[in-house]
């Protein structure tokens, strides 16, 4: 997957050829239809991503695997995932949650990769609840 994206961006000299695929992974169809302004704003950010920066990240991401070290994180941690996220699916978030003692997992329905934009109330509620709990832990 990453090798193909790298080849595409190198050939085009921009991330433009990846725009439609990226947006389809970032947003669920109902949200994309209901909030085209939000999708347009993210599309602009993707379009203006420097090709070299994207390529650097695309070379690094497949090499990162810190799963075995997650148990070393001892501070309270909130893991938020959109139920429909194809890039970082619920199963991946559950694995992270299981590996991190004391973590909290929140699955936001009707959201893909950008749950904070698709379901801002649910996202903000989860974050606020978590932070309120952090006040009680200190």
Image (cartoon, rainbow, N blue to C red):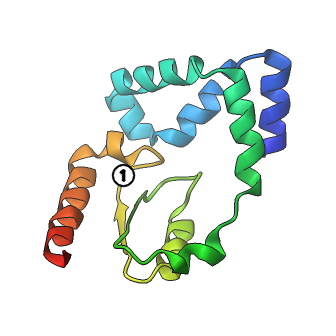
Rendering quarter of residue 3 = top right
> Local crowd at mark 1 within 10 Å, few (<14), some, or many (≥20)?
some
Seen from the viewer's position, the closer of residues 131 and 11 is: 131
Residue 7: image location, x then y, percent: 85, 31
- In the displayed image of the protein, which residue is found farthest to the front? 138
Residue 6: image location, x then y, percent: 80, 34
Position of residue 79 relative to residue 20, above or below, is: below
Q: Residue at x 21, y 62 (%)?
A: 131
The total number of labels drawn is 1
Q: Residue at x 75, y 32 (%)?
A: 55
Residue 90: image location, x then y, percent: 50, 65
Residue tagged by mark 1? 110
Secondary structure under badge 1?
A: loop
Residue 45: image location, x then y, percent: 50, 22
Q: Residue at x 35, y 21 (%)?
A: 37
Rendering quarter of residue 15 = top right
In this rendering, would 3 be left or right of 94? Answer: right
Q: Residue at x 57, y 67 (%)?
A: 92
């Amino acid at each position: 997957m990453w090798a193909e994206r790298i080849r595409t961006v190198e050939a085009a000299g921009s991330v433009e050829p990846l725009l439609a695929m990226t947006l389809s992974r970032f947003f669920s169809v109902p949200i994309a239809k209901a909030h085209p302004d939000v999708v347009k704003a993210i599309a602009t950010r993707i379009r203006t991503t420097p090709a070299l920066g994207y390529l650097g990240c695309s070379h690094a991401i497949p090499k990162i695997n810190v799963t075995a070290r997650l148990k070393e994180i001892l501070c309270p941690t909130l893991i938020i995932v959109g139920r429909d996220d194809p890039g970082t699916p619920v199963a991946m978030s559950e694995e992270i949650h299981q590996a991190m003692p004391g973590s909290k997992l929140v699955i936001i329905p009707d959201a893909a990769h950008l749950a904070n934009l698709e379901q801002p109330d649910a996202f903000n509620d989860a974050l606020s609840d978590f932070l309120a709990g952090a006040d009680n832990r200190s």
